[in-house]
Image (cartoon, rainbow, N blue to C red):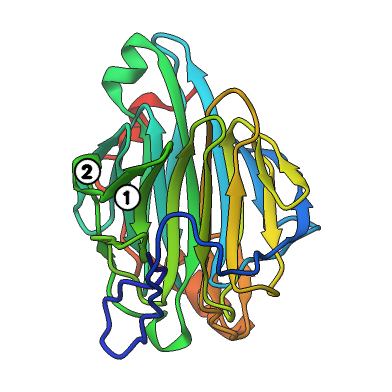
Amino acid sequence: MGVGGGALLLGHPLQAFDGPLISAAIRPRRVGSLVEPVRAMVGEVFKVRRTFPVAALDQVDPFLLLDFFDFTLAPGELGGLAPHPHRGFETVTLLFDGAIEHGDSIGNRGRIESGDVQWMTAGSGIVHEENPDDSLRERGGRVLGIQLWVNLPKRLKMTPPMYQDTASPAIPVLTDKGVRARVIAGSAHGVTAVIGTHTPMALIDYTLQPGAEVSMPYPRAWTAFVHVVDGIATIGDTQIGPGQLAHLNTEGSGIHMHNATKRPVRLLLGGGEPINEPVARWGPFVMNTKDEIRAARADYRSGRMGRVANPTYDRIRRR
């Protein structure tokens, strides 16, 4: 069993570890801080609970943002997320339930549904929209998932935009001893993700049945967080409830997670090799300097990032 980064670029060292699902040969990391989410609205319907960036936690390098969304549309309800730009990082949408459609300024249109992952490298700049799918909007229903922003190192911030949309059946899954692990990025328990990353990292969607546990080696130099989607997870002597995020400290050689309750728990483990570069943010742009932010804003205002042709949002926006 290992944790490492599947890489789009050659030359990244993959830090692999062999062993069973339960390993006694580790000293587990403890929870450094338990972060309560801040509620926010993204667009008109995406009700999110944000655990970073917030006052208590700015980032978990290389991750810049985590929004947990869980809302239910009434049949025929209008509203969505208008076209908006990004530059300098990647947006990752893990959709657990529902259906979302998207379109962008370079002509792409697509749809993800329950279990799918959209990994969009904004790079040099893109304008896109994300909205609940028409069929879901018509009948009404739940939309549940997580959006992450993943930083790009300085050398790649102006890389051309690209997508890695991955349907649920293509995502590697391991099931053993009451644990189900979907390996979104990196590698774990002998399973390697199909999604490539620019920075070595781990992103694993776990479901733990009552009494189940995971005890795994983990690179000492990497950051780590655990976000609970549903249920209550235990790390050391800390319980983490739905919507909360545990930011793990850097001491220890592995991670141990346990479900001590009588109902299943679903959680997301994330982390990776820190980029350790200056971060300059302004809304949808994340660069290294304020001058680069000013350039991004100017490029967007002048139309150099393009526009979404015939946006879905014009049809479904609230009036």
Q: Which residue is mark 2?
A: 167
Q: Is residue 134 above or below residue 237?
A: above
For the residue carrying disc 1, how many other residues have a C-alpha within 10 Å: few (<14), some (14-19), or many (20+)? many
**Is residue 87 visible to us here?**
no
Residue 118 is marked as 1
Disc 2 from disc 1: Cα separation: 9 Å
* Mark 1: amino acid: Gln
241 with respect to 12 (left or right) = right
Q: Secondary structure at mark 1?
A: strand
- Point out residue 23 in the picture as x, y percentages from the top left corner: 50, 61
Q: Tell me the residue at 35%/54% (across/down).
A: 183
- Point out residue 225 in the picture as x, y percentages from the top left corner: 61, 58
Quarter in which the N terminus is drawn: bottom left
* Mark 2: amino acid: Ala
Q: Tell me the residue at 67%/39% (across/down).
A: 40
Q: Is residue 190 above or below residue 160?
A: above
97 with respect to 102 (left or right) = right
Residue 20, image quadrant = bottom left
49 with respect to 192 (left or right) = right
Nearer to the camera, 231 or 253: 253
